[in-house]
Structures are given as C-alpha cells and as structure tokens.
Amino acid sequence: MRTRRFSALAAALLTVVLAAGCSGSGSGSPENATGTAPAQSGPVKLTYWTWVPNMDKIVQKWNAANPDIQVTVSKQAGGDDAAAKFLTAAKAGNPPDLIQAEYQHLPSFVAAEAVADIAAQANQVRSEFSEGLWNLVTLGTDGVYGIPQDSGPMMLFYRADLFDKYGIEVPKTWDEYAEAARTVRKKDPKVYLGTFSSKDPGSFAGLAQQAGAQWWSISGDAWKVTVNDAATLKVAGYWGDLVREGVIDDMPYFTPEWNKALNDGTLLTWPSAVWAPGVLEANAPKAKGKWAVAPLPQWTAGENVSGFWGGSSTAVAAASPHKEQAVRFATWLNTDPEALELLVKEGAIYPAATKGQSVLTEAPGYFAQQKDFWQLANQVAATARGFTFGPNVNVTYDAFKNAFDKAVEAKSSFADAVNAMQEATVADMKKSGFQLAQ
Amino acid sequence: MSTGVLPARAAARHARPRLHPLRGAVPTAVLLLGAVYCLFPVTWVLIAATKTPGELFSTATLAIGSGLWSNIADLLAYRDGVFLLWLGNTVLYAGVGATLSAAVSALAGYALAKYRFPGRNLVFNLLIGGILVPAVVLAIPQYLLLSKAGLADTYWSVLLPQILSPYGIYLARIYAAAAVPDALVEAARIDGAGHGQIFFRVALPLMTPGLVTVFLFQFTAIWNNFLLPFIMLGDDRAFPLTVGLYTLLAAGANQPSLYNLILTGAMLSIIPLVALFLTMQRYWRTDLSRGAVKS
C-alpha cells in the first residue's frame, strides 16, 4: 500500500496475466503427485522473494543448520508490484519457490493457481496462530495457501504532548474522536486531529474490518461481494462528514506534506497499525518520545475490536519442484522460536505466531516512554478481526483510490465512492469469469 | 550570401536585429526557462541528498543539509554494499548494451543506406514501425519469450532486448546516407577494397559522430530503464540501480521508505551519466569527409 506510485504498472502486469487466461496451463510445473523432487545429488536449492529487511541474515541461520536445503533470498520491492511480478513469473513458468504474500493478494495467487495448497504439512502448525490470522491463509476453505508471517493490528497513535496542550482526552469512541477533531480546530485552526487518506485502501479496509465489514465471502462455488455493506458505509459516511465539515484533513499518508505535518505537530493522530513506530521514526525523527498509542476508538462504547492493516504470509509456488522442503523452511521461519526472535529483532516485523509476540518486551525506541507498548499491541492483536479477501483486491483498491480521490476533491458523498468500489469489483470478477452469488 | 543578387532582401535581413534589439532576448529567455525547467529537479536531488532523515521533511526545500557524507556512508553500508553491485550491474548493462547496440546500428544503418537490395524499403519501414512501438509495451512479451528460452532472470534477459534499437538503426542510416559519400565508397571499391574493408576502413570512421550519438542515446536509455529489468530479473544481485533503488522505496507496508538513501543513490547514479556526456562531447565533430571528395 506504500507503493501506489507504480500501481498502474501493477495493474498493467495483472491485466496481461489475466488476459493470458486463467487456465493455469501448467507450463513449467513438472512436479509429481506429492510435490517432492525425484532423488538427486547435492542440496536442494530454494529461491525466496521477500522484502523483509535483513532476511538474508535470518536465512543464514537456516542454511547453516540445513546443509541439504539451501535458501537464497532475493529482496524485492514490496507490496502490489511484488504480487504482480510473482503472478507474471508464475505464468511464464519460472516463479521463485517461496514468496512473501500479503494477505490481500493471496486469493489472487490462489485463483491463478500460482501457489500450492500445503494443507497436509501446514495444518500441523495451525495451533501456533490465532483463528483470525489462520483464516486469512485458508480463505475459509479446507486448503492452506501460506504460513502467516506478520500482521498489522490497528491502533490509534497520537501526540501525547499536544493532546495535553489542547486539553484533549484520548478518544474512546469514534464520536469522541469527532468531537476532539472539532475542539482542536477551534483551539488552533492550523492543526488537524487527523486526516483521511484517499490513497491508502489498506487503511480503509482495516477500519471497515473494525466496524464488522465483510467484503468477500465464498458460498459453495460462488463468491459473494459486499464491499458496500452497512458497516463499510457507516465508516465511509463518518469520515466523509468530518472531511466535508472541514475538521479532518484530506491529505494522503506517506506524502512529503504528511511527513511535514507529523514533524511540525500540525497532525495529532494516526489510526495505523502496529508497524507505525518504524514509519514515524523514519519520517518524524524530531517527535521522538512525544507519540503514544491507545486502542482504536470504538463504534459502540465498551466494545473492544480492531482491524488489520497489512501483514503477510509465506507461500509456496505451485510450480516449485521442492514443495515439501519449501514448506519445511516456511514453517521454521514463522514458528521456530529462534527464527521468530530474529524476525522481530532483525526484520522489525510484528510476528503472526502467538508465541512470537512474547519476544516483544522492550518498547520500540521511538515509544520508549510507553513501557506497555507491546502488551497493549498484543491485547489489540487478540481483538482484531479481518475478513476474507477476494481474488481481485487490486481492482477494488484501485477503485478506492479513484473514487475517494474524486470524492475528497469534490467534497461529494463517500457512500457513492464505496458503491463505485463495489461496482468495479463485481464487474471485474464477472469479466474474469468468477461465479458470483447474488 | 549577399553577393548582389538580392540586395534589398539581404539588407532587410541585416537590418532586422537593429529594428528589434529585444527580439534576440525572447529565444534566450525561452532557452533559459527550459534550462531551469530541466535543471531544477536535478538541483533538488543534489540538495535533498545532503539532508539527514531528520532534516529531509523539516527544513526548507532548498536549504542544504548536513548529512551528505553520512548518507553516502549509510548507502554504501546498506546490505553490505549492494549499491556498488547495482552500480556495477548498471555499468555492465548500459556499457555492453549500448556498445553492441551502436555496432548493430552501424552495420544495419550502413547497409540500408548504401546497398540496394530487394526488400530494403520493407525492412526500413518495419524499423520505422518499431520506433513507434514503445518499449514498455514489449517488456512483457519479451519476458514470456525469454522465459521460454530459459534466459529470464539472467544478465542476457536485460542485455538482449536492448541491443536492437530501431531508433539507433534509423539514425545510423540517416547519418550514413549523409556522411558517407557514394563517391568515396566507389573509389575504395576501385582501389580493390572488399565490403568489410570499405565498412571498417572508410565508412565507420566517417560515421563515428553519428554512432557516438546512438551510443549515448542507448546508454542513457538503458541506464534509466526500469520496467524491463524489473520484469526480467528476480535475483536482486543482478538488479541495476533503478530496480535496486526501487526496493528501498517500496520497502513494504510495515517499513518506512529509506528516502535519504534513495535520494543519495539517485544523485550518485547521475554522476557517471554527466561525466560520460562531458567526455563524449569531443567526438561530436561533423563534416569529417570534407576534403575527401571534391564535388
């Protein structure tokens, strides 16, 4: 979601892949029934596309301990482009053996028959993950298409020092958040409590998940698409009203002006995910120690739910001749205590495995004053709910950007923008030949 | 020019600057504007590359920062110096690719300009058509093709598609037609030179300025190419700078983009291009054949 600059490219790649037919012609998939390679001399060599920082160092541990299964890491550009590139490589018959697959892209990999069903081996580690995360790699079916690696439960990040200055309480509900937004504008017209980003569909999806949205579901052989369900319309209406009222800014995240606002204290909150400290530290180094974190405001007082923004799994390519070994590595990487510790310390990820979360004890340097950072994160993670992603999330996300860009520009109805997302999603799925339940 | 044939018009032509002394200022102003338009982004990169991560988004846009050396040190230390590997790859892709491309263009352009053979116009028209097809459109078919040949994700997959440059051949043909006089080729033939000898000893030296242009065009195009290597290469040890720096930008949702390293990398990667243009300029001499033929 940080890679929107090339989303047009990603879309172009995907279009070609889809145009090449969803037939899964099986070029270059010489595996036998069990997916194991015939006996051979020398170690099995696996390639692994990922963008987790320092993954080379983590894999070194595995390579040293497993001379017969050697993994080579190839660091890729992350996000939507990586997904498009993997799909193209899979179509051409030369994908890597292992791939970092974001949860929202996994269904498109499954639909293109690019990733293998690894249920037989993977079900052994099912208990290591929460039910919600496991559903993201099964898509609610009997298959398992990846091992969860990291997740992004959402929380509210806020400037503690400026909250004190303006005399605002940390909002517990979205109503309180809206009220606080108005208060801030009254006290200092240069300052906004928050901003609505029309360029980050992942963030919007997370907020919709918190409200209980279900954008896709599978019933039998057919997909059901409900991007414009009541929960999503509620979230869209809430932000749309605040933006129109002028109490919430409409500047997108991850832009230079957003970075500037974070630095000079004219933006007070960011509803974001557990990985936010890294972003804040890099983009707003001056505000170190001034930010704090709280659970997301709730829709109903007393409730305690959150959504996910980001997160990924490790999937095995359907065309890999060494699936069994690849799953062994993926399992080690995402469930072994030593590997989890490395993922946390070197890779700076929030691990999906429940026991990996206990490795996180010392608050991130940027939040040094908030000693309970990880306890809070772990509590929120347990209450975060995701939803099943569909096979064309890229289309839905592009529709989000187009429709919300326009809605923000014209100060028009956000509900219409959500309906546009629904229409674009359904139209694309029909065109691609998916069965749709009414 | 004004040898009395059309004295009135010649006089008017000379008089013009005197009548409108400011007329010369307009083109100059337009050119200056163009220069600012082209140079401002470069200046911005140069300045931004001097800023530490803390200064990047908090100081004035054109204020010079204090972090140039630490940025360079961080960039060179990033993933055990992978930047230098990417730089080496880019030099290889651009250097070898542009040399081969210039060689192919020279041969093809010379043949198209100086030989009469059936299908010559068809070949040339196909090439003109090739100029009209953007390379971006070809990238994915080329990827599928090279995958079939088992060459995807190798150095060849980036080199091969860029060797044949329709625009380069077109340029070489135009240049050969203008710079290599038929009389000279005929004289060489009468003196007993073979086809190869004529090309290497007579035509090639005359075509050098044109070929330098082809080389520079292609070198810059390969140096800046993003899409082809992005699609072709999976192995990050084979990435050129463009794709490599992009992995720093699109670092994934849970990682911040390493803006200061990207900017420093972008700044360092234009230095060789600037140096190349400055040193290659001296080959741009026209009219090499003056004195070889009297016509």
Image (cartoon, rainbow, N blue to C red):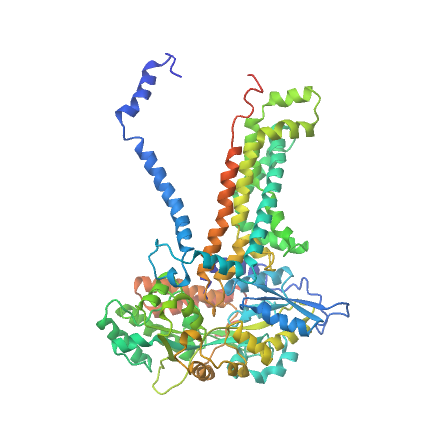
Q: Is residue A43 left or right of residue A229?
A: right
Query: Quick one: A141 or A282, which is closer to the camera?
Result: A282
Name the residue rendered at 52%, 53% in the picture. B226
x and y percentages locating residue A228 in the rendered image: 41, 73
B282 up-or-down from A295: above or below: above
Quadrant of the rendered structure where residue A52 is? bottom right
Image coordinates for residue A121, horizontal then vertical, percent: 65, 79
Spot occupied by residue A397 in the image (x, y as percentages of width and height): 45, 66
Q: Quadrant of the C terminus of chain B?
A: top right
Q: Nearer the viewer, residue A121 or B242?
A: B242
Front residue of this view, candidates A256 and A18: A256
Give the quarter of the figure containing the N terminus of chain B: top left
Q: Estimate the x, y position of residue A144 in percent, counting from the top left.
A: 60, 77
Q: Where B202 sits versus B1, above or below?
A: below
Residue that lies at the very extreme toward the top in this rendered image: B4
Residue A207, can we see it? no
Residue at the far left in the pictured view: A186
Residue A309 seen from this side: yes
Q: Is residue A58 left or right of residue A206?
A: right
Q: Residue at x 67, y 74 (%)?
A: A65
Q: Quadrant of residue B129?
A: top right
In the displayed structure, B144 sits above or below A66; it is above
